[in-house]
Image (spheres, rainbow, N blue to C red):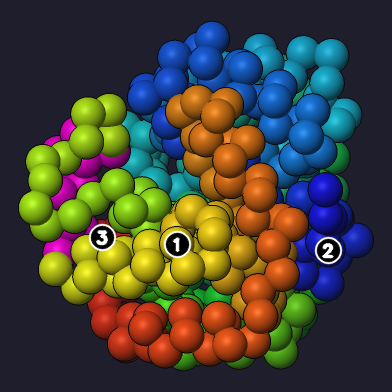
Amino acid sequence: MEYRRLGNSGLRVSALGLGTNAFGKRADEAASTRIIHAAMDQGINFIDTANIYAGTESERIIGQALTGRRENAVLATKAGLPRHDGPHGRGSSRYHLQQELEHSLRRLQTDYVDLYQIHTFDPHTPLDETLRTLDDMVTSGKVRYIGASNYAAWELMKALGISEQKGYVRYISTQTSYSLADRTPELELVPMCLDQGVGIIPYFPLAGGILTGKYNGQTSVPSGSRADTDPSFNRFLLEHNIQLSEQVSAKAASYGCSPSVLSLAWLLTRPAVSTVIVGATRTEQLEHNLASLDMSLPDELLADLDQISDSFRRREPFASYRID
């Protein structure tokens, strides 16, 4: 397994990380536990979850699965997106974050989180309040490092500036939708992260499964796929996404690999990327995607992939989660 520094920090994470959004939802507890153990057995140490995944079930399952193995995991969770409809049910206020961290720690059966991430920018809470709260969490020992998610480049840069000015602990990473089907981070976020030493953690690296080649314009939605279990996902099955998927599949076939492995291998070459979050509902999916770590893409193939996906640098982001 290849390990990379998360940004300019001393934290080292596996080049492929385990995404757990499906745990407790599309993957039951038994399947999720098998996937976690298989990932760790293969050297994956970065496990990413959030307080809202599967209505908190993802965190609970992970906590149970890590019994006896906690020290071998770099455990990351998030808070900030809506948990309930109450006045403090969302956002990055001190009130909400302290409450949610305690709940997450109980579900995860641990007394610390390696990476605590703000799930999205909160326009209603001063950044100073959020960052001071996170600084206090690190001082307390309940959090080791902090990261952002779904921040625009200017929002992240503003946060880093406040941390530097006030002497607060700073964000070492940011999560963003990033793939061949969403290259919008390359316009502003990637250059900013390279300049500031912030590691990028792409989510939706396979565009929710579109880049696996399982969807096309002629057949029905595959049984058990994300579009099958979550009908709202069908909004992503647009002509330009399907066309890109077909082009990537053709390149992969000529190179002798699957489109998912090729897409992940491409993303692993991108500047500032520290670890790529890969979800799974079966251990076979995880084991298949690990092949991306062993691929060395020739310059000609990289150029071809850049060319067929170039228009996706200026389209709307594939996904972005915000609060009003």
Q: Dot 2 surroundings within 10 Å: few (below 14), some, or many (20 or more)? A: some
Q: CA distance from mark 1 to mark 2?
A: 32 Å
Q: Marks 1 and 3: in contact by CB < 8 Å?
A: no
Residue at the far top: name it: 30
- Which segment is the magenta one? 226-238
Give 168 or 23, whichever is nearer the viewer. Answer: 23
Count every numbered label the image shows and give the total.
3
Q: Which mark is residue 313?
A: none
- Circle 1 — which element? helix
Vertical comparison of 295 with 38: above or below: below
The image shows residue 19 at horizontal and vertical percentages of 55, 41
Could you tell me what secondary structure mostly forms the magenta stretch? helix
Vertical comparison of 12 with 22: above or below: below
The image shows residue 111 at horizontal and vertical percentages of 78, 26
Report the amino acid beneath label 2: Arg
Query: Residue, x 71% and y 69% (percent of image)?
Result: 296
Dot 1 corresponds to which residue? Answer: 253
The mark closer to the camera, 3 or 2, is 2
Q: Which mark is residue 5?
A: 2
- Closer to the chain start, of discs 3 and 2, is 2
Q: Say left or right for 41 vs 237.
A: right
Give 69 or 292, whichever is nearer the viewer. Answer: 292
The mark closer to the camera, 3 or 1, is 1
Report the amino acid beneath label 1: Ala
Q: CA distance from mark 3 to mark 2?
A: 33 Å
- Circle 3 — which element? loop
